[in-house]
Image (spheres, rainbow, N blue to C red):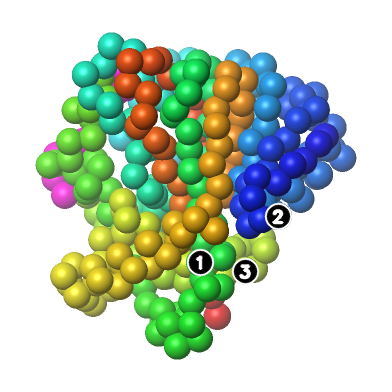
Amino acid sequence: MIIRPLTGLIGAEITDLDLNNLDEASFQALDNAFAQHLVLCIRDQSLTPSDLVGITDRLGGPGETPYLTGLEEYPDVVPVIKEANESSPHTFGAGWHTDFTFQATPPAKTLLYAVDTPAAGGDTLYANMYAAYDALSDGMKAALKSLNAVHSATRSYGPQATLKNHLEHMTITNDDQEPDTQLHPVICMHPVTKRPALWINPTYTIRFENMTQEESKPLLDYLNQLIISPQFCCRVRWQPGTLTLWDNRCTQHCATSDYQGHRREMWRTTVAGETPIAFA
């Protein structure tokens, strides 16, 4: 296994590894690299949906995937497809977010496998929320430490959401009524590394607890812009056979919508997570 960091703070590219023949020592090395780099871009894989399910099981088992429709024989594998002839340039996953933070137990990890990719474009960007927390002043850390934030699926999957209108070859279901909200600490402690991370995102974090959206917006905007500062980010360029694995407990990510007129097909699974806990 060869590990090449993508940046100084987040991401690594891995080559010379076959995920279909992963012994225990290699699995442990992969796990160690994951804890260090948060995003692992593993090249030159040959995976079937069954293989992807098997890897997901080994990493902790699949998480719940509401609103999205998986493959008929493998419902935990969600095809993310953009055909060349689609009218909208919008890509699923565009806009900075952390996956499904509207859930009580959001995914611990996400796996995305590239089946078909454009010659250029369709990259995914990732941001390190440990580093964003570390960059805060002591006063801001203290102010945020006692706060919870309200998370909701309404912007993407609520009654008025238009996400599905832009994605002609994906089956997405909207809620008939406003979806339930979920409270999570603004500063979360990672259950494995025990490190604090700034844990909000602009897609699912609606406001701070006991505050209005108008009151919350200036600080949420500031924090979300801090998280995606260039020094905290990396970029993964896809090619067929690439599997990227990322840690939802300490990252945000964003797909780019810059390949209209070209086909892109990915398979997505998530690994079940834990209840987020506040950093003490």
List the residue tagged with mark 2: 36
Looking at the rendered structure, the kind of residue marked 1 is Ala
Say which quadrant the N terminus sits in: top right
In the image, is residue 236 part of the stretch drawn in magenta? Answer: no
Please tell me which of labels 1 and 2 falls first in the chain: 2
Q: Secondary structure at mark 2?
A: helix
Q: Verify CB contact (< 8 Å) between mark 3 and mark 1.
A: no
Looking at the rendered structure, the kind of residue marked 3 is Arg
Determine the CA span between mark 1 and mark 2.
16 Å
Report the front residue among 77 and 240: 240
Say which quadrant the C terminus sits in: bottom right
Instruction: Assign the magenta stretch its main secondary structure.
Output: loop
List the residue tagged with mark 1: 132
List the residue tagged with mark 3: 195
Q: Is residue 57 visible?
A: no
How many marks do you count on the picture?
Answer: 3
Magenta span of residues: 169-178
